[in-house]
Amino acid sequence: MSTSTAAPSTVSARAWVVLALGVAAQTAGTVFVSAPAFLIPLLHTERGLSLAQAGLLAAIPTFGMVLTLILWGALADRIGEKWVIAGGLLLTALAAGGAILAEGYLALGVFLLLGGMASASTNSASGRIVVGWFPKHRRGLAMGIRQMSQPLGVTVAAVTIPVIAADAGVGAALFVPFALTAVLFVACAIGLANPPRVAPRAGAAGAALPPHNPYRASGFLWRIHAASVLLVVPQFTISTFGLVWLVSDQGWDALAAGVLVGAAQFVGAIGRIVIGVVSDRVGSRVRPLRWVAVSVTLVLVLLAAVDAAHWGAAAVVFVLATTCTVAPNGLAFTSVAEMAGPGWSGKALGVQNTGQFIAASMVGPLMGALIGLVGYPLTFAAAAVFPALAVPVVPRAHAEHDHL
């Protein structure tokens, strides 16, 4: 890895290229991870799986990510981001190819697990590479754009996977993430470049000192991690069960429901940019993060009320809920990377993602079982408890420090 004294104060053309490839790379990985969630209507209504069983299958790629996020982050800290991202995409494409050819749910689950383990590379490294290329006063914008990748990936999956699966089966639907990850592997291998690095601290004898451990300095990172875990529960509740809720509870056909879910995710992607710009303007990541946590709580309570009362505004509130629930990620990621510094940001982002995806992997089976027991309105109300708990956990703005 190359070293330099500091990140530039202006944004270079290369930085925008890296940002575009980072967004595309994680979008492709997200399509793979989220694809099984959009197979739930087919598996539940036509293949006879319960919502809890289908939700468990949908959670397998996320569980795979949990196993490797910190390892990918540590590898990015050591060798740089370019080949972590490109190599992970290649492995994800291979796993998607195996899933296409798999016979039976057990074999399918194995390849979904392997693909989730591989796709974690883009989560750990693409955020780090973007933060490294952009100065502080533009990082909120840059990470807001980068964080568009998750809702964009869900959008692509929402408008393609259900329709293809209904017409040609599960294997044909999984060709979408296979093609995307294969193409992005080539693009990232050619176009990505590791950002300039801050020179390591030198000791009295001139030898490089190991970077400070930010987890020992304060509880800031732990509080961001904890708040993010709480905020991911409503996000994955909506993204995992939104489509099947529209189809089975609201009476939408699969195509129209997929279009609405995709549109909602796209609006959420724009919302991530807006909240990132707001954080640049107010000079804080955690203050807007607290605002978002309050908003998520309120909108989920509203969604539960609308569903229970059978009001006609369910689709509008669903779009609003999707937008709010996906908004926190960019703020939290940027805050973690800035606080951790260049020597720890890969590992810290790996820890950040690991906590989130542990929670996310539990959302499918647990919320699916809860829906089966008490229905959608009470499940949405239960999901609102988590962002409410996150509000006091988010650190105060005066605790923020930038080590990048």
Image (tube, helix red, strand yellow):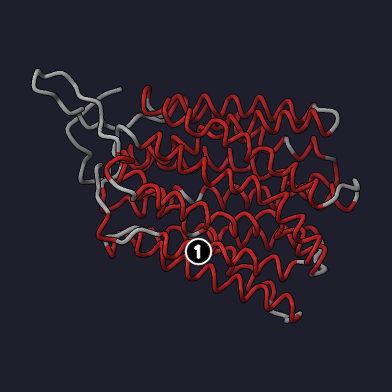
Q: Is residue 124 left or right of residue 398?
A: right
Q: Nearest the camera: 321 or 57?
A: 57
Q: Is residue 342 left or right of residue 87?
A: left
Q: Position of residue 178 (x, y in %)?
A: 67, 32
Q: Which residue is mark 1?
A: 389
* Residue in the picture at 13% in, 23% down: 203
* Residue in the picture at 78% in, 66% down: 374
Q: Is residue 213 left or right of residue 359?
A: left
Q: Residue furthest left?
A: 204
342 lies above or below 161: above
- Quick one: quadrant of the N terminus? top left
* Residue in the picture at 90% in, 45% down: 47
Note whether residue 85 is visible. Answer: yes
Secondary structure category for the residue under label 1: helix
* Residue in the picture at 76% in, 61% down: 371
Q: Position of residue 117 (x, y in %)?
A: 59, 31
Q: Nearest the camera: 21 or 325?
A: 325
279 lies above or below 110: below
Q: Nearest the camera: 79 or 55?
A: 55
Q: Position of residue 81 (x, y in %)?
A: 41, 29
The amino acid beneath tag 1 is Leu
Picture quarter containing residue 27? top right
